[in-house]
Image (cartoon, helix red, strand yellow):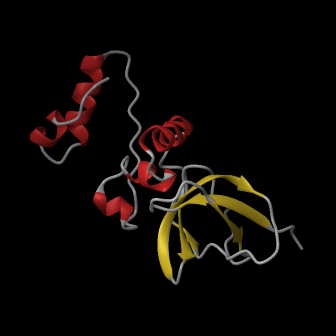
Amino acid sequence: MTLPRAFEVAVPLPLHQTYTYLLPDTIETPPTAGCRVKVPFAGRTLIGFVTSEGVVTEKLKSIQSVLDDIPILSQDLLHLAKEMSRHYFCGIGEALSTFLPAAVKKGTKARVVTILTANPEGAKDALLQLADSPRAAMQHRVL
C-alpha cells in the first residue's frame, strides 16, 4: 500500500489561496506543478492548476482526473501568476488561466510544442512549418 499524496490546486475563481486535494489510488501517474486537474469545488467540477505538493490531512476531497501528462505551465509562469495575484488582487487560478487559450481552459488536450533554435530566424522558420497557415505562424512572436 502506498502512502496517500496530496496536491495544492489553484482554481480559476477570485480566491487568493490554493486548495489541497488528495490523489486517489485510481490515478496511477501523479500530476506535477503546472498540470491541469479536474476537481470538485462547491458542488461543481472545475479545472484547476497544480501549484505544488500538499500535506495530507483529514477530510480532503479527491482529484477526479489529471488532464496533462507533462506540465503545460512552467515554474516561471507559476511564479508570475503568484506575483500577478498579489499585484492585481486576483486569484492565483484566475492569473494562471490567462496564460492559456480558451479551449485548453475548458479541458481539451493541450498540444505542447518545443522549438529549439540557435537564432531568431530559425525560430521563425520552425513556426512557419508547424503552423496551420503562414498567417497563424506570423502571429507568434519570437522573443
Judging depth in this view, the residue of 74 and 29 nearest the camera is 74
* Residue 38 on image: x %, y %: 52, 71
Q: Quadrant of residue 60?
A: bottom right
Residue lying farthest to the right in this orientation: 1
Judging depth in this view, the residue of 30 and 84 nearest the camera is 84
Residue lying farthest to the left in this orientation: 135
- Residue 126 is left or right of residue 42, and the answer is left
- Residue 110 is left or right of residue 141, and the answer is right
The N terminus - image quarter? bottom right
* Residue 7 on image: x %, y %: 69, 60
Number of marks in the rendered image: 0
Relative to 31, say whether 2 is above or below: below
Question: Which residue is at a point 25% across and 41% down the rendered structure image?
Answer: 130
Question: Which residue is at a point 48% across and 55% down the rendered structure image?
Answer: 93
The C terminus - image quarter? top left
Q: Quadrant of residue 106?
A: bottom left
Judging depth in this view, the residue of 112 and 94 nearest the camera is 94
Question: Which residue is at a point 78% across and 64% down the rendered structure image?
Answer: 5
- Residue 44 is left or right of residue 142, and the answer is right
* Residue 20 on image: x %, y %: 68, 64
Residue lying farthest to the top in this orientation: 119
Residue lying farthest to the bottom in this orientation: 43
